[in-house]
Image (cartoon, helix red, strand yellow):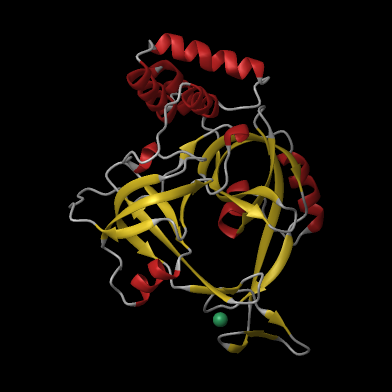
Amino acid sequence: MVDENYDRIVEKISKSSGLEKEEIERRIEAKRAKLAGLISKEGAAQVIAAELGISFDNEKLKIEELLPGMRKVNVVGKIINLSPIRTFTTKKGDEGKVVNLTLADDTSNIKVVLWDTNHISLVEKQDIKEGSVVEIGNGSMRANEIHLGSFSELKFSKESIDNVITEKIVKEKDISDFKLSDSVSTRAFIVQAFEPKFFYVCPECKKKAISEAEGFSCSEHGKIIPEKRALINLVLDDGTETIRSVLFQEAIEGLGLGDLEDSDNLIVERQNLLGKEMLFRGDIRMNNFFNNPEFIVENVKEVNEDELLTNLEKE
Ligand SMILES: [Zn+2]
């Protein structure tokens, strides 16, 4: 698999240091060997850059070039999605506000989180809205998101940005390379399949329905006749690592299990899933209960052997 980010970092180190790319790659491999492979190639490249005194700080980057762990990130992009302002209670008991938005340029898009009241007031006053082109200064990368605090800048940009990438960026990755907020696709084996769990949602807003003494209600829509939904937990393994995964309705259909409420059938079907290799696409999220990353699977597909063969021939 070609890792463009990695190639770009090596390129930058080479330009700034005057070292040959081969020499830099040799140092990166040596660093990884020393750390017994505990660090990714990208991570090792950043360590080498730091050792050579090369900083990516304050350099204007394309969204695709942003990497987890980077600080003082500068980037220009168009806001393609702006979530409503959320309020929460801080540890001190004050009311805090947070805004999520998606910023896009011609290479990719990324989630940006605003924490600073000055930045949020720009959104409240609708000075900044969907379609605005903004320049971000001094942001920090947390996993695959840019976070803006009180030392960060958010201002209008006069740049015009065409051809922004609005599609969700799905990366083909090994499980060991999964990072929080990644959207990924991977080929993996099902090594555990748990019994389905059922829950109820509001038919209108699809929020979880509240069970009452008599029937169900929704915080927004009052008394409702809920829809029954299923979820299934799987443990996936691609040879690099295992990950706990959650599948909801649409993804479950991809498993082809038949009637989920027929428990006799299900025992057999679950058994058949074990050891099966399939294609999984979804997002990596933090499970706050287990305090572990979790793979929220949106789509499951059979591995198409013909397709694999053609891909192999192309390579
Ligand atoms: Zn509702």
Give above or below for 278 relative to 205: above
Residue 109 is left or right of residue 297, and the answer is left
Q: Position of residue 307 (x, y in %)?
A: 45, 28
Residue 124 is left or right of residue 71, and the answer is left
Query: How many numbered marks appear?
Result: 0
In this view of the protein, which residue sits in the foreground, 124 or 205? 124
In this view of the protein, which residue sits in the foreground, 297 or 168? 168
| Quarter location, residue 209 | bottom right
In this view of the protein, which residue sits in the foreground, 254 or 258? 254
Q: Position of residue 1 (x, y in %)?
A: 47, 24
Q: At 40% across and 49% down in the image, what residue appears?
A: 138
Give above or below for 14 relative to 118: above
Q: Quadrant of ligand 1?
A: bottom right
Q: Position of residue 216 (x, y in %)?
A: 69, 84
Q: Quadrant of the C terminus?
A: top left
Q: At 48% across and 50% down in the image, what residue appears?
A: 145
Give above or below for 127 relative to 220: above
Residue 8 is left or right of residue 224, and the answer is left
In this view of the protein, which residue sits in the foreground, 290 or 183? 290
Q: Position of residue 287 (x, y in %)?
A: 68, 55
Give above or below for 305 relative to 150: above
Residue 155 is left or right of residue 232, and the answer is left
Q: At 35% across and 54% down in the image, what residue appears?
A: 103
